[in-house]
Amino acid sequence: EKQLVESGGGLVQAGGSLTLSCTASGFILDFDQHAIGWFRQSPGKAREGISCLSSSDDILSYADSVKGRFTISSDDASMTMYLQMNNLTPDDTAVYYCAAVPRGHVWIGGPDYGCYPHIFDIWGQGTQVTVSS
């Protein structure tokens, strides 16, 4: 079964930083053949796209709420994707998920493509990030 496994969540004070990692289980996460993304969900709220990246299409996006503070990246050798989060605030408290979608499953860059949860079909179990004030 294709799965992603997140790590790196935890409790941090406002203004602090965390780096989330995500690795593949049951398949090869080739970043040339997959679009990747980070999402988060707070209690009572819908899951939202934080940042999505398709390296081969040079398509990168960030939610307005995290621009300038969060950075998505990937490492081909270790097949690991990352989310560097700086200057965290209590509003960033949520469960964070990584996700991927193979190029053959969606028209990356097409009119319906975007950093939306329904676009991605391989998910991690989520990792809790809590930011205290």
Image (cartoon, helix red, strand yellow):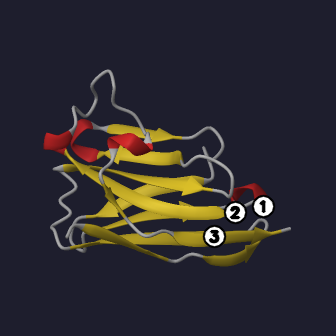
Residue 57 higher or lower than 14, as above or below: above
Mark 3–mark 1 distance (CA, rounded to whole Å) = 10 Å
From the image, which quarter does the N terminus lie in? bottom left
**Which amino acid type is marked by label 2?**
Thr
Residue 115 position by quadrant:
top left
Residue at point 18% right, 73% down? 26
15 relative position to 53: left or right: right
Residue 67: image location, x then y, percent: 60, 44
Are discs 1 and 2 less than 8 Å apart at CB? yes
Residue 77 higher or lower than 69, as above or below: below
Q: Which residue has dot 2 on it?
A: 93
**Which amino acid type is marked by label 3?**
Val
**Which amino acid type is marked by label 1?**
Pro
User: In this view, which residue lies farthest toward the right?
Assistant: 133
Are discs 3 and 2 less than 8 Å apart at CB? yes
Front-most of residues 68 and 38: 38
Q: Which residue has dot 1 on it?
A: 90
14 relative position to 33: left or right: right
Residue at point 21% right, 71% down? 77
Q: Which residue has dot 3 on it?
A: 129
67 relative position to 82: left or right: right
| Element under disc 3 | strand
